[in-house]
Image (cartoon, grey):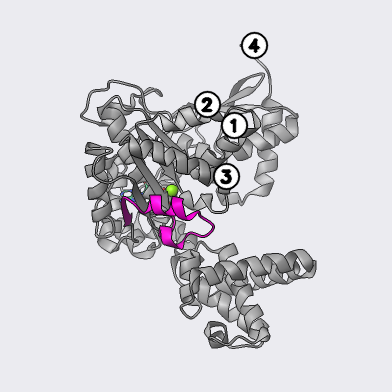
Amino acid sequence: MAEWDYEILWKETMNQIKGELSEQEFTMWFNLEYIHAAEHEITIAVPSSFYKDQVKQRYQVFIENKLRELMGKEVSLAFEVKPKKQNGDHPDAGIPEKTDHLPEKRSAADNKPKAAKKTAHSQLRKDYIFDSYVIGDNNSFASNAAFAIARNPGTAYNPFLIYGGVGLGKTHLMQAIGNFIYDNSDAKVIYITAENFTNEFIQAIRDNKTSAFKNKYRYVDVLLIDDIHFLQKKLETQEELFHTFNALYDANKQMVFTCDRPVSELKNLSDRLRSRFERGLNVDLQPPNYETRFAILKKKIETRGVNIPDEVIALVSKNVSTNIRDLEAALIKLIAYAELVGKPITVETAQQQLKDVFASPRQTNMSLEIIQKVVAEYFSLSVNDLKSKKKTQNIVFPRQLSMYITREITEYSTTEVGQAFGGRDHTTVMHACQKIEDKIRSDPTLDSTIQSLIRMIKEYNAKS
Ligand code: ADP
Ligand code: MG
């Protein structure tokens, strides 16, 4: 490939990004060094493979969009791991980084006892395996069932449906089943999110390729569809999935689905598809307790091969209780920091580095209470009014508004929000959000009211 010189454009891109992110975020994640370029690809150096994964997940699309804006054409990023920067900007971290010094292309099966017989499955994350899934109070039933299914797909529990809130391990468990079957047999495994399934189906209709689509999904051995709550209202896709389901079910092919709530709570889902989802085994994942959180962190740390003292693990486990994704995010921040400054992590540095995370509204019910408090005050009501059953318009509207804001600025599920508002059903919350959305469309000033309320809430939250 011919060499292209995009270095100046790269610098400009970085400059612009710098202006858009906080200094801390930029310093932490944009330790990216331009190496060389081809017409449609820029290769940059990153200090470790861990860092590379993080940057890819968090910023690749963002950077590529920026590049496109600036250059007026598609340019993608390629990464090269260069453990030590020549200019000495970032001293050696002093923390062993297991994968760092290994060649880029490791076999997916390296960590597994089973033979390294084939390359990794292209749709499955190779680290989402049973070995890395910690069994705790919150998931023991689900993970045992998953393991049983992985060993005997298509027999006992079909379909298998895992539901639960965000970041509780649904995707990991689902992919562990996929990886296990893929590694131990010649079964054809497909993993797809419900969103992509929908998009692919729409595209197939457009391109007149529905029979290819049908063939693809009706002749697999294992079909994993993630986040089926996305199918709500997608009636045509539901119809298609219904037929796919029947074909696979009749052929004893294993299906696994995940959903962010019990299937019974899904709206705008055809009854016949709902009854199919409910047919096999439906299990839920709960948030992990302290011991499980500790064990999960310990495991992640072990796998990363970094050195983090137990007191720090305890601190994080204690302070991050929402879900495992948040727990991991906190850990990643610590590791990245340690890599960057080259110092071991102490309780003090952890506390310092994670103070935002610990204070994050998602960590406690704080932000929900704060939202209620701020909105109630704004409308001269009491928080109890918002939670009450009163149906007068002067209360209903603020109540709906606070529900809407909660959904906008927190990760609480409609079920959780409903609970916080006097034990209401999640459908009430969905209805409230819909109402507010409709109102925003007909009354543009409402949006600015909402924005100023959100600012007030954030200020209040930062102070408390
Ligand atoms: P969900 O799909 O429910 O939103 P994910 O499966 O994406 O959640 O999990 C979020 C993160 O937490 C992932 O990185 C996953 O590996 C990790 N995780 C979740 N549960 C466990 C567990 N029991 N043991 C180890 N890691 C876990
Ligand atoms: Mg998921």
In the rendered image, residue 269, in percent from the top left (x then y), is placed at 51, 55
Q: Give the CA separation, mark 3 to mark 4.
A: 46 Å
Circle nearer the N terminus (1, 3): 1
Is residue 373 found inside the magenta-colored segment of the image? no
Q: Are marks 2 and 1 in contact (CB under 8 Å)?
A: yes
In the rendered image, residue 239, in percent from the top left (x then y), is placed at 52, 44
Is 231 rendered above or below residue 74?
below
Quarter of the picture containing the N terminus is top right
In the rendered image, residue 375, in percent from the top left (x then y), is placed at 63, 79
Mark on residue 2?
Answer: 4
Q: Amino acid at mark 3?
A: Glu
Q: Give the CA separation, mark 1 to mark 4.
A: 36 Å
- Residue under circle 1? 204
> Can residue 328 be seen by looking at this rendering?
no
Judged from the image, the secondary structure of the residue bearing numbered disc 4 is loop
Q: Which residues are magenta?
A: 260-283
- Please indicate whether residue 39 sits to the left or right of residue 201 in the image: right
Mark on residue 212?
Answer: 2
